[in-house]
Amino acid sequence: MNKRLPLGLGFVLLVLPCSLLVAFTHYPAVKAIINSLWNNASSRRPSRFVGLENYEAMIADDKLMQVLTNSGLYALGTIPAAIFLSVSMALLVNSRFPGTGLMRLSFFLPTMLPLVAVANIWLFFYAPGIGLASQMMNAVGLPTINFLGSTETSLASMMVVAVWKEAGLFMIFYLAALQGVPENLKDAARLEGAGPVRVFFDVIFPLLRPTTIFVAVNALINAFRLIDHIIVMTKGGPDNSSALLLFYIYEVTFRQRDFAYGATLTVLMVALLGALAAFQFWVLDRKTHYQ
Amino acid sequence: MTYKWNSAMPFVMAALAGASATSLHAADLEFYFPVGVNAPAVATIEELTSAWAAQNPQHTVEAVYAGNYEETTTKALTAAQAGDPPQVAVLLAIDLFTLVEEDVILPISDIANSAEDQAWMDGFYPAFMSDAKFEGKTYSIPFQRSTPVLYYNKDAFRAAGLDPESPPETWDEMIEMGKELVVTDDNGNVTQWGTRIPTLGLGGAWLFGGLVVSKGDVLSTETGTEARFDTPAARESLEFLQQLSDEGVMQPGGISWGDTPKAFLEGQTATMWTSTGNLSFINENAEFDWGVGFLPGGDGPGAPLGGGNFYIFSDTTEEERDAALDFIKFMTAPENAATWSIATGYVAPRPDAWETPEMEEYAAELPQALVALDQLPHAYREFATFQRAKVTQSLVDAIESVVTGGSTAAEALAEAQEEADAVLGDYN
């Protein structure tokens, strides 16, 4: 126990993790800040230091405002929906109905599919006229909706895909948490005359709070991180109505090859996510009851 | 450590020298190619490349399938920036300005400078060579070229009492005939639209170029520094697209490129505009009598050109360049161009390819393939400028905002023009 690690060896052991952290996190972040202060140079446009010009362009960028609004709506729409759906599914598969094993499997299946494959499935589903959604609506006499081709429905259509994809995974966390809720607390509440709804809202759901926080944070990260379905299904269109922040960064950087503005947008995204992480750590964590 | 390093250096140097010495007698080519059609393209490319390698045993060639067009360009540019570009690649014809700006390609006319080479380059259709040139030099060689045509369901024409042998030729006819072709069910919901012109994304912008050409204007010129969005021709073209859905001929809202051939095959639309690259797909899957016509035009026929050309990268040795040129000549030789065209539906880029027996047989079997060729004199280069992806996005946004009802053609195009001018101002 008294054997202390020699200081030198300690540093040696730190080299690998630190170099990974520096190479893949800190260096790119610093480089993005530096790049955001230069113009986008090429053989026909010399490289020059532009100071905060890229940031001024960013503030004046109408498209960015739309993208941020979309991202906000997307997060606000997908997080509660995913939580609601995953709690409902967890309650369902946690009950003693027959066939819960099959239900668990089918609820979890979307999580196991790669998002690109999911997006292709939904592409068929949404296709106006020929897709399943259209055929179902036509069967009951409703007109065809051009889900991905109209600005009113494209973002909502993307949100449905995201919720469908991630709710199964969150269900597993809720299921584990539900199985950890002590029976005696529920029994005590029932003895006091609480109905099943009251038991859920006053006993079970508060005990699930750490899971809810965890799920909410993950859903939030996913809302910013996952854009595969956007790339496959709408390319952010029509008229940028389904473009999210990361998708916009990808478009600007790799398709339009504007590395300077891409770096500027990346700085914005890192700042936004940093603020959200700080909120999560300092505010939500303190209010949560862990056992 | 220092001592060991120094003592190892001569060996390293020797090894490096050895490696470069062996690559002097022959060239090892790396060839990036994209696939953008529903066809067994990879197998055909590999067949053709191995045939070249068999004829040229001193060289080797590795055909690298690099995804769709966009991914292939990104990969080639990334590899070039890392100092290890492919020697030869098939990339979009409209990537010319990007590749010139990134300074990664060589003008092929600098390598192919003999009289014989000149005759070879003159053997391509001039329409396809037009977008291969910049500042008087030919930078690329046409390979897999396409152009959109009007596909129409002859059975639907008969059912509507229209002549199945005369598809619409003008915008007015598209609207008149389109109205006849619309079929609704008992609830008043449309089950068959009159037409389908994709309006979303890059596919939509490509077709839009054809509308503008038919109105006697162009979206961009060979300088690469001019975008012409806010013009009467462009406004009328965009208004025409809007009119199609206002008159109930085309489904309102944005129309995606990818769903269009399927919607046509399923009978959801009586006519569609899409690439000749879909000819073999439609031919194999259509369960009805179908035909192909010129794209109906505003003031006469007009179409955009599309597709990919061969490029040679600049970071290459003399031997590699010569081998790459020989490889390109082989791939575009009449019989090989014919094989490629038949396998994919691309328009073979040389008249002599169309004179091969294989091609004549193919054209007899599938006369629809000849329509694109006849339309060629009315076709103009696809929209391309420096910073193409960014400028095209402004055009895409303008088209999408109009077809989804977000703004008027005049407003949207004026805004796109402003954005394009801001980007291209750096180049004038």
Image (cartoon, grey):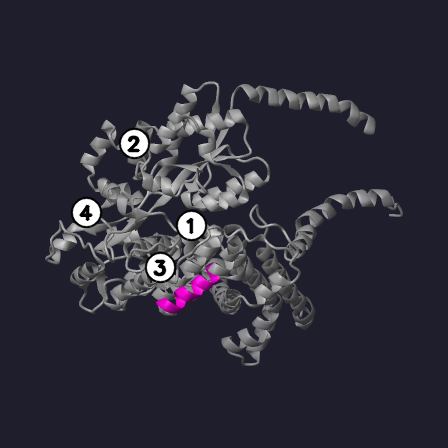
| Front of the two marks 3 and 4 | 4
Give the percent coordinates (x, y) of residue B150. Answer: 24, 50
For disc 4, the neighbor class at 10 Å (few under 14, some 14 to 19, many from 20) is some
Inspect the magenta stretch and tell me whether residue B410 lies in it.
yes
Residue located beneath label 3 in the image: A126
**In the rendered structure, which segment of residues is drawn in magenta?**
B409-420
Give the residue at x 19% y 65%: B185
Asked if marks 4 and 2 fall on the same chain, the answer is yes
What's the CA distance linking mark 2 and mark 3? Answer: 38 Å
Residue at disc 1, secondary structure? loop
Disc ID at residue B338? 2
Q: Looking at numbered disc 4 in the image, what kind of residue is underneath it?
A: Gly
| Front of the two marks 3 and 1 | 1
Residue located beneath label 4 in the image: B291
Give the residue at x 14% y 54%: B157
What's the CA distance linking mark 1 and mark 2? Answer: 28 Å
Residue at disc 4, secondary structure? strand
